[in-house]
């Protein structure tokens, strides 16, 4: 039985990934400082193959010990998103980059490192984005993720997954991701104000990401030392097109395009996911599946304040 370490495993992605790995027979150890006071991984404590450690990835003694004890290392711990990183630049560099650099230093060639990156590293482009496209990071968040990816690939002992904008329900919910945010506002406010509505992004369901990590563990030797875009080929769409898809589920939604303000996130690109698809990988969830899921989920949690489900 392979032993997997997930740093930041109680977060939005980590909590879902933990479930997927446990269900597939892996031993999973999480280290997380529970910054957001989340109890997202509590449902897994019944499982004898689950181990939770309350700790911080800046504790190098603890982190080194955990790296040495596991077969697969997945560094998810991060300060996520442009606003959060901008408010804590020193901590962002320490967690987003230095944590990963240390892991590559301590890991042996017999271990697997699977690192998530972000499509935001590509910035904006009029060309279709592939894994060979140049990086144009527009934020400290993207810069640190690029540096972390480079340290893994330079080590010759890891795989980088460049994730599209994530959507879907999680045990540790976030509503500050674009699809999740749009659906939440559509349900609670009844309208969406779109800045630069022609900007294009790619999207991917959170469980498809979790299954991609599983896919890479199973295909590690073939995929090692490579980077892969992970997104829905059917979901390269503008913010206006996304809003219109939501409107099909919420017909009374009012969509307003505002051309007098600039969006703080200037990403604008179409992404090719053909490299990953050529390996036989296929997603299980469409963008429409996610919208329907989010509507059902928000009907359960919308009595709470939005700030309880955000990294901002």
Image (cartoon, rainbow, N blue to C red):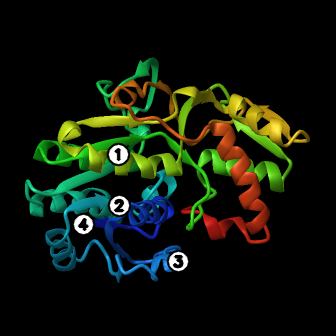
Label 2, secondary structure: give it.
helix
Between 200 and 271, the residue placed more toward the observer is 271
- Which numbered disc flags the more N-terminal residue, 2 or 4? 4
Vertical order, 124 against 162 (above or below): above
Residue marked by disc 3: 43
Q: Nearer the viewer, mark 2 or mark 3?
A: 3
Residue marked by disc 4: 1
At x 54%, y 63%, the residue is 311
Label 4, secondary structure: give it.
loop
- Which numbered disc flags the more N-terminal residue, 4 or 1? 4
As drawn, the label of residue 92 is 2
Between 118 and 84, the residue placed more toward the observer is 118
At x 48%, y 51%, the residue is 82
Label 1, secondary structure: give it.
helix
Q: Are marks 2 and 4 in contact (CB under 8 Å)?
A: no
- Which numbered disc flags the more N-terminal residue, 2 or 3? 3
Residue marked by disc 1: 215
Q: Quadrant of residue 76?
A: bottom left
Vertical order, 197 against 152 (above or below): above
Q: Quadrant of residue 229?
A: top left
Q: Measured from the top left, where is residue 186 in percent x and y? A: 80, 48
Q: Quadrant of residue 111?
A: bottom left
Between 47 and 169, the residue placed more toward the observer is 47
How far apart marks 2 and 3 lie (CA) works out to 29 Å
């Amino acid at each position: 039985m392979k032993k997997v370490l997930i740093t930041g495993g109680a977060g939005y992605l980590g909590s879902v990934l933990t479930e997927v790995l446990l269900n597939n027979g892996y031993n999973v150890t999480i280290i997380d400082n529970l910054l957001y006071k989340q109890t997202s991984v509590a449902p897994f404590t019944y499982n004898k193959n689950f181990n939770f450690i309350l700790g911080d990835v800046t504790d190098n003694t603890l982190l080194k010990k955990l790296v040495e004890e596991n077969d697969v290392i997945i560094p998810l711990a991060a300060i996520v998103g442009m606003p959060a990183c901008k408010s804590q630049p020193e901590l962002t560099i320490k967690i987003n980059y230095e944590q990963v650099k240390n892991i590559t230093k301590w890991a042996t060639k017999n271990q697997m490192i699977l690192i998530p990156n972000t499509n935001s590293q590509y910035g904006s482009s009029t060309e279709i984005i592939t894994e060979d496209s140049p990086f144009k990071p527009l934020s400290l968040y993207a810069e640190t993720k690029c540096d972390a990816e480079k340290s893994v690939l330079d080590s010759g002992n890891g795989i980088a997954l460049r994730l599209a904008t994530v959507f879907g329900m999680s045990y540790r919910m976030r509503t500050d991701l674009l699809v999740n945010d749009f659906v939440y506002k559509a349900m609670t406010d009844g309208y969406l104000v779109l800045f630069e509505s022609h900007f294009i992004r790619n999207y991917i369901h959170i469980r498809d990401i979790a299954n991609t990590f599983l896919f890479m563990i199973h295909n590690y030797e073939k995929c090692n030392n490579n980077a892969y875009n992970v997104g829905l080929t059917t979901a390269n769409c503008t913010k206006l097109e996304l809003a219109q898809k939501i409107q099909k589920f919420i017909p009374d939604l009012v969509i307003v395009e505002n051309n007098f303000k600039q969006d703080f996130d200037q990403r604008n690109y179409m992404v090719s996911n053909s490299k990953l698809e050529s390996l036989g990988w296929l997603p299980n969830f469409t963008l429409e599946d996610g919208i329907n899921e989010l509507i059902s989920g928000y009907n359960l949690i919308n009595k709470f304040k939005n700030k309880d489900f955000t990294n901002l």
